[in-house]
Amino acid sequence: MHYLGIDLAWGERRPTGLAVLDVDARLLHVSAVLTDDEIAGTLAAYDGDCLAGIDAPLIVKNATGSRPAEQALSADFRRFHAGTHPSNTGKPEFAGGTRGARVAKRLGLDIDPRSGRRRRGVEVYPHAATIVLFGLPTVLRYKAKPGRDLALLRSELLTLMSLVESVVGTDDAWAVLRDQVETATQKAQLRRVEDQVDAAVCAYVAWFADHRPDAVTVYGDLDSGYILTPTLGGAPVTNLPSRAETVRQAVREYAEGHPELVRAGEHAVEQVRAMLDEAGINYLAVTGRTKTVASFAEKAEREVDGRVLYDDPLDQITDQVGVRVLTYLRDDVEAVADVLAEETTVVDDRDLGEETASEGRFGYASRHLLLDLDGQRVQVQVRTILQHAWAEFEHDIRYKGTVPEAHVGEFDRRFTLAAGLLELADREFSEIRDRLRAASATEPPQPTSDPDDPRLDPRELAVYLAGQFSDAGWSRTDHYAWITGLLLELGVTSFDELSEVLRRVDEPAIAARMDYRHPPGAVRRLDDALLWAFGDRYLGLHGNAHRRPLLAQRLERMRG
């Protein structure tokens, strides 16, 4: 005996989910197809005794409105937001009969719910079935609708999959589907999975109806159309642990692994800082933190409108390890994100500033990237110093302070005004930098250093490099001082000597071979020029001992 699940699309241009269970509710097959021929071909291997649960109207005779079965079921399940869509012959897809009846006939299924034949098919409705089977307070919101973002859809679909796993013995194909959901970066990727998950629910409803005929209700009848579903009010079949126990277990596991996470967080900061330094990106600070056990426990218990946010806290709370990069200007935020995308695996990337702006308002602005660093998920926030100041102050006032109800509207208006002013300030600072860079390109460096110090003055070097590499961005202040030490090791103690070195350098060739994907800072440009000019001698400098392997890789690229 087999139990078929068919989440049937109303037309052949959208996928139909298929699933098959055996008599022990073990998953034998799950897939998605398009056409009736593909449905028949896929299920041909299960040509013996079977009961199919079909999520699609089988019998539609009413010219308008809803079928009596739909009206009756919706009256019972509407409070769970599990009402049905209306079916009638006025809709083109039902004008010439139903696709469900045609597929059932093709498969040799008797669609009479009271039939005793060896091959039968019944109309089912997964939304209503999950309410009863799993004791849900409302339907899971895994269907894409306006206002539902990717994170919500992914979380809800994973919840449904966990519930199915509590009653169905799943296989490797199911594990692949779960992985596709966990790694999805677009809603369309979830859409390709949800039909197959719904099909598994349909198959289980068929299994449940065959094993517990006393615990199902048939709304409607064979003449006007019917829907079979587990009886409302019945005991849930799932044996999943309680919500409180799930949270307690997650917190226990988090606490046990916390020391290792702290070490992972420290390593993540070092990795991000090294990537940005190697790329020559100008930034203010790179800091990090690992979420405390208390903070993790608080977040794991959060609810919104009576619904839990995290069914699997250890997997779904992705900011356990966090890194924050502060930049001076908005252009640098983009450069940092580009570098991290080149050097790591980006699991998710959200520009919350763009999302805020797309809604026609000012407010929180930050680039959030979820990275995979050596197998550890790390959330990296990248923002300008002004964006950071606004976010920290706003968070401190709203979440740590107490805003009197009478002043909420005024505070909202003032925060919005401040956000707009800071965005304007960010733009003005960018303009100031661009004009200074242009001016520096035409002015020679003015002596400011101690005449007895053989090193080039870092401030003079910054002005010199702005003219030498006019298309380069500024570098970190401490990097100008650092590279003057390398110049001293090379015996370069004047700008005339440095100019003579750079005249031997083929800048276009360096740019072509290094394939800069973002504008490197001026110090990085000089670093590459010195590597080109001095080669192995530059590698051997004492000041380069800590990064010799990286420089060796760069030199190999330069030499082709």
Image (tube, grey):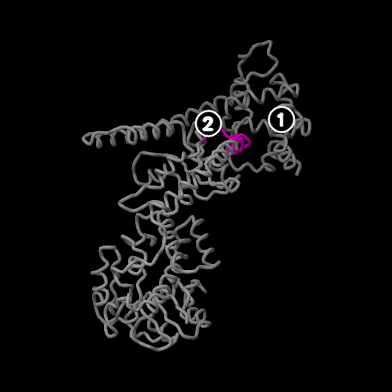
Residue in the picture at 43% in, 30% down: 428
Residue type (three-letter) at the residue carrying disc 1: Asn
Local crowd size for mark 2, using a 10 Å CA cut-off: few (<14), some (14–19), many (≥20): few
- Name the residue tied to disc 1: 544
Q: Which mark is residue 401?
A: none
Q: Residue at x 27, y 72 (%)?
A: 73
The one nearer the camera, 495 or 80, is: 80
Of 477 and 275, which appears nearest the observer? 275
Crowd rating for badge 1 (residues with CA inside 10 Å; few <14, some 14–19, many 20+): some
Image x and y of residue 260, in percent: 56, 41
Name the foreground residue: 5 vs 521.
5
Question: Horizontal and vertical percent for residue 490?
Answer: 75, 24
Q: Residue at x 50, y 85 (%)?
A: 47
Whether residue 20 appears in this view of the structure is no
Mark 2 falls on what kind of element?
A: strand
Q: Residue furthest bottom?
A: 117
Does residue 7 lie above or below 385 as drawn?
Answer: below
Q: Quadrant location of residue 54?
A: bottom left
Task: Kindly indicate the quadrant of the structure image that contains residue 208.
Answer: bottom left
Which secondary structure lies at badge 1?
Answer: helix
Q: Is residue 272 above or below residue 91?
A: above
Q: Amino acid at mark 2?
A: Ala
- Residue, disc 2: 285
Outermost residue on the left side: it is: 406
The magenta segment: 271-288
335 falls in the magenta region: no
| Residue 382 coordinates in the image, percent (x, y) | 49, 38
The residue at the far right in this view is 536
Residue 309 in percent (x, y) is at: 38, 51
Give the Cα distance between marks 2 and 1.
Answer: 22 Å
Image quarter (top left, top right, bottom left or bottom right) of the C terminus: top right
Determine the residue positioned at 35% across, 57% down: 146
